[in-house]
Image: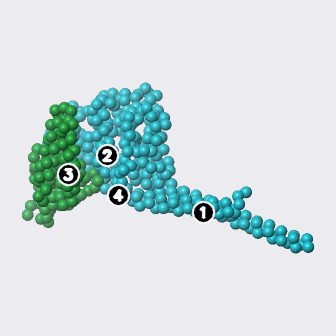
Chain colours: A cyan, B green
């Protein structure tokens, strides 16, 4: 049985932990707001991009579409871009993304395909390294980046496109976590290359004023300029969603931790009081029985 | 007074401008073009340069954009820029860094095609620098 002093120390230490988790929760809440704003601010761009791309893809019908759109015609080598957070302490956020990527990898490997992995974020690398260290071709570290900028996404996109141009892979899939709400982030796999054309529903909302577009330079060239940009935009919005999701997950994880610490303090306090009472009773009995003996 | 139309300047980070304007000068792939209301539908890539916006209220604003493309319709114009800043907030060091990078690209270029591309980009950047520095 722990002594009273031990119990007191335990309570003090749990209280200190609770203070830390509470502070982390509040920091995460503040950062979440900022991340959400950033994600929201980026939305108009990617929406417009989708509209324009759908428009132009209609004009360039198949014949001279750039290879980034049509793919190489094979699907032997798959490239997985796995985006995770740089830090832990955010519940199952990172492991969920990593699990999705791992399942995907296993499926592809058992189908006899070759898999290459690019890890964005330290945590995903740490998890995937255990099973597939030999498949990881690159890792991108964004730890220094306070606020994720478009340049980061552009860098990743350039790397991917460079690999594609070098014929290193046929299909590229992006893994990230979609931010649904503070308590729910959905790990998602999204195909980047070959680019999937926008769905018809989206394309229909586009009104081009009844006119036919003039393209400067011609449509094919424009499209081959647009698609790399679109890939960068998709990576960018994935990173932003991830950032918001990470903060959301961290907030709820820290909220849980704070609550657990509270429960623990309550339990420990009860044990402490009970033991203190027991000791007092014991001392009283000793005094009384001593007096009676006289 | 000329008719006004809707102009939007969007960068990946945020929506910079969304208002009614009289005319916009866009540094298009094949030279600068002034867009006014009821322009024929054009889609063009945008080179690094200065976008001059004349609002319906008669105010003139200048923005520096680094690449992107413009979607021009009779009833509006959307400019998706890779990066855009108001000319007053331009980060001169950032621009100098870009030029430095472009120079390195030129010297690192592996084949003729890449070199031509990098040189063209560098030329655009230096023109841009000259255009905004006295401002």
Quick one: label 1, few (<14), some, or many (20+) residues within 10 Å? few
Residues tagged 2 and 1 counted as in contact (Cβ below 8 A): no
* The C terminus of chain A, quarter of image: bottom right
Same-chain check, marks 3 and 2: no
**Residue at horizontal 35%, vertical 36%?**
A172
Q: Quadrant of residue A62?
A: top left
Report whether residue A263 is seen: no
Q: Secondary structure at mark 1?
A: helix
Quadrant holding the N terminus of chain A: bottom right
Secondary element at tag 2: helix
Which of the marked residues, 2 or 1, is nearer the chain's N terminus?
A: 1
- Percent across and percent down for residue B130 are 11, 52
State whether residue A239 is above or below residue B56. above
Looking at the rendered structure, which numbered label has been put on residue B95? 3
Q: Which residue is mark 1?
A: A12
Query: Could you tell me how far apart the alpha carbons at marks 3 and 1 are, in whole angstroms?
Result: 54 Å
Between the C-alphas of marks 3 and 4, the distance is: 27 Å
Extreme-right residue of the structure: A294
Q: Looking at the image, is mark 1 or mark 4 earlier in the sequence?
A: 1
Residue at numbered disc 4: A37
What residue is at 40 percent from the left and 45 percent from the top? Answer: A121
Given this view, does label 2 or label 4 mark the residue nearer the observer?
A: 2
Gap between marks 2 and 1 measured at Cα: 45 Å
Chain letter behind tag 2: A
Q: What residue is shown with label 2?
A: A153
Spatial CA distance of label 1 from label 4 is: 38 Å
Chain letter of the residue carrying label 3: B
Residue B25 screen position, x and y as percent? 12, 54
Query: Pointer 3 and pointer 1: residues touching (CB < 8 Å)?
Result: no
Of tags 3 and 4, the one toward the viewer is: 3
């Amino acid at each position: 049985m722990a002594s009273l002093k031990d119990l007191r120390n335990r309570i003090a230490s749990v209280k200190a932990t609770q203070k830390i988790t509470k502070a982390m929760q509040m920091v995460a809440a503040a950062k979440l707001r900022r991340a959400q704003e950033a994600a929201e601010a980026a939305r108009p761009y990617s929406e417009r991009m989708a509209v324009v791309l759908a428009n132009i893809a209609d004009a360039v019908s198949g014949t001279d579409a750039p290879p980034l759109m049509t793919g190489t015609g094979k699907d032997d080598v798959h490239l997985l871009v796995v985006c995770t957070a740089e830090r832990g302490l955010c519940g199952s956020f990172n492991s969920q993304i990593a699990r999705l990527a791992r399942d995907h990898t296993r499926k592809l490997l058992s189908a006899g395909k070759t898999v290459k992995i690019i890890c964005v974020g330290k945590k995903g690398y740490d998890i995937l390294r255990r099973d597939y260290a030999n498949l990881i071709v690159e890792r991108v570290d964004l730890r220094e980046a306070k606020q994720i900028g478009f340049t980061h996404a552009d860098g990743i996109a350039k790397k991917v496109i460079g690999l594609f141009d070098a014929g290193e892979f046929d299909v590229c899939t992006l893994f990230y976590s979609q931010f649904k709400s503070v308590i729910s982030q959905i790990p998602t796999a999204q195909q980047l290359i070959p680019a999937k054309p926008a769905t018809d529903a989206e394309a229909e909302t586009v009104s081009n004023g009844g006119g036919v577009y003039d393209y400067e330079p011609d449509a094919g060239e424009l499209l081959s300029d647009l698609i790399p940009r679109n890939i960068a935009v998709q990576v960018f919005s994935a990173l932003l969603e991830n950032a918001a999701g990470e903060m959301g997950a961290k907030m709820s994880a820290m909220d849980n931790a704070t609550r657990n610490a509270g429960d623990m303090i309550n339990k420990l306090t009860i044990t402490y009081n009970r033991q203190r009472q027991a000791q007092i009773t014991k001392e009283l009995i000793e005094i009384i029985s001593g007096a009676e003996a006289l | 007074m000329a008719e006004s139309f809707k102009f939007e300047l969007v960068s990946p980070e945020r929506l910079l401008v969304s208002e009614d304007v009289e005319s916009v000068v866009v540094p298009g792939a094949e030279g600068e073009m002034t867009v006014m209301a009821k322009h024929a539908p054009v889609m063009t890539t945008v080179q690094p340069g200065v976008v001059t916006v004349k609002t319906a209220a008669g105010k003139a604003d200048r923005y520096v954009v680094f690449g992107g493309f413009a979607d021009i319709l009779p009833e509006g114009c959307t400019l998706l820029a890779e990066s855009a800043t108001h000319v007053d907030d331009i980060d001169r060091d950032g621009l100098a860094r870009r030029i430095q990078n472009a120079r390195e690209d030129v010297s690192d270029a592996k084949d003729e095609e890449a070199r031509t591309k990098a040189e063209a980009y560098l030329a655009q950047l230096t023109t841009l620098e000259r255009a905004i520095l006295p401002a």
